Amino acid sequence: MNVQHKGTALITGANNGIGLELTRRLLNEGWQVAALIRSAFPADDLLIKEAVKSSRLRIYTADLADFSSLRGALDRIKAGEPKLELLFNNAGGSFPELLYSPQGRELHYELQTVVPYIITKELMNLLLKGTLRTVINTSSNAILSVKSFDPALLEQPRTFRKLFGPYAVSKLALSLWTQEIAPALAAEGIMIRSADPGGNNTLRKDKDSGLPFYIKPLMKMFFRHPSYGAGLLYNAALGSHKDKPGIFLMKDRVSSLKFTRHAPSVLKKVEDIYLQEFTEVTVIS
Ligand SMILES: NC(=O)c1ccc[n+]([C@@H]2O[C@H](COP(=O)([O-])OP(=O)(O)OC[C@H]3O[C@@H](n4cnc5c(N)ncnc54)[C@H](OP(=O)(O)O)[C@@H]3O)[C@@H](O)[C@H]2O)c1
């Protein structure tokens, strides 16, 4: 394939669903991809196989919700990648019950709100060495369903609902800190925004989806192929809004966030976890 290299995009959760389709699209367009993933890519994917062989796709493995594992992978990325153009914080999903990270925080919150902040902070220097210097946080239109929001409950929610409970709240918290931090990051040269990838059928036989029972048949019948969501994330990074920091995009349109008065306290929370906990983490080998 004779394609001109466009630089490197780091994608979390690149091995399945929307992240996999984004990886495939970027590779097909001549990008290199650094994949930060927990489990393997599909073994039968020829594009992926070829890209790994030619080192256009470089794999870094971690359970992102485990700070020791994440620390190790970030260290390997810093050692292995000279610079990054794009960072897609995409790993996540709706879990079927209340679960907690090894650090003791509710799992949606840890994985989808806290960890994207940590990865962004840790990889800022690599982004600053690139030209596009863009971070896209994968949010969700499920945030529209959030009726009440208390940052004090993010770590230990009192109640649980599939998709519309801690999942939706953690995505709202992600979009809130993204909006709040954006001016400061823009002043340093980094563009950050969040985007909803829309409805994509990413059901897997081997995974309990954590979706309400009535959503699964709807997903099978009406949700799009995950290349649709990959396209929306791609546009969020490189499309017509590429010079706008902090925005939340749905279907390629700038959309407003609810509960923005809480954005400073959400940002403070993730910042504190990063500075007080993550920077102290050592890698257990
Ligand atoms: N599908 C939709 O309609 C939709 C709508 C709105 C937002 N989203 C968001 O889009 C993103 C991608 O979701 P998807 O629909 O493509 O789901 P998916 O096919 O289940 O992909 C999720 C990805 O996240 C990874 N991941 C989950 N937990 C992880 C952990 N602890 N450490 C490392 N990686 C982890 C998964 O890794 P494994 O392969 O190891 O499980 C997988 O690669 C998520 O943030 C999701 O919330 C999806």
Image: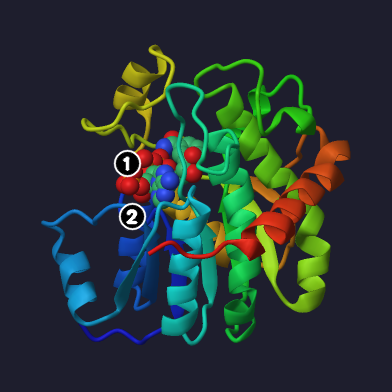
Q: Is residue 229 above or below residue 132?
A: above
Label ID, residue 48: none
Question: Going 82% across and 64% down the picture, which residue do you hit?
Answer: 183
Q: In which quarter of the image is residue 110?
A: top right
Q: Which amino acid does label 1 sit on?
A: His
Camera-nearest residue between 275 and 191: 275
Q: In which quarter of the image is residue 158?
A: top right
Q: Earlier in the sequence, mark 1 or mark 2?
A: 2
Q: x, y percentage for residue 180?
A: 81, 53
Q: How far apart are marks 1 and 2 (CA)?
A: 9 Å
Q: x, y percentage for residue 30?
A: 34, 78
Question: Going 58% across and 52% down the picture, which residue do you hit?
Answer: 115
Label ID, residue 225: 1
> Marks 1 and 2: CB-CB under 8 Å?
yes
Q: x, y percentage for residue 142?
A: 58, 29
In this rendering, position of residue 160 left or right of residue 28 = right
Quarter of the image where ligand 1 sits: top left
Tell me the colour scheme of the image.
rainbow
Q: Which amino acid does label 2 sit on?
A: Glu
Q: In which quarter of the image is the N terminus?
A: bottom left
Which residue is identified by label 2?
A: 21
Q: In this view, does 156 lie above or below 160?
A: below
Q: How crowded is mark 2: few (under 14 residues within 10 Å), some or many (20 or more)?
A: many
Camera-nearest residue between 147 and 119: 119
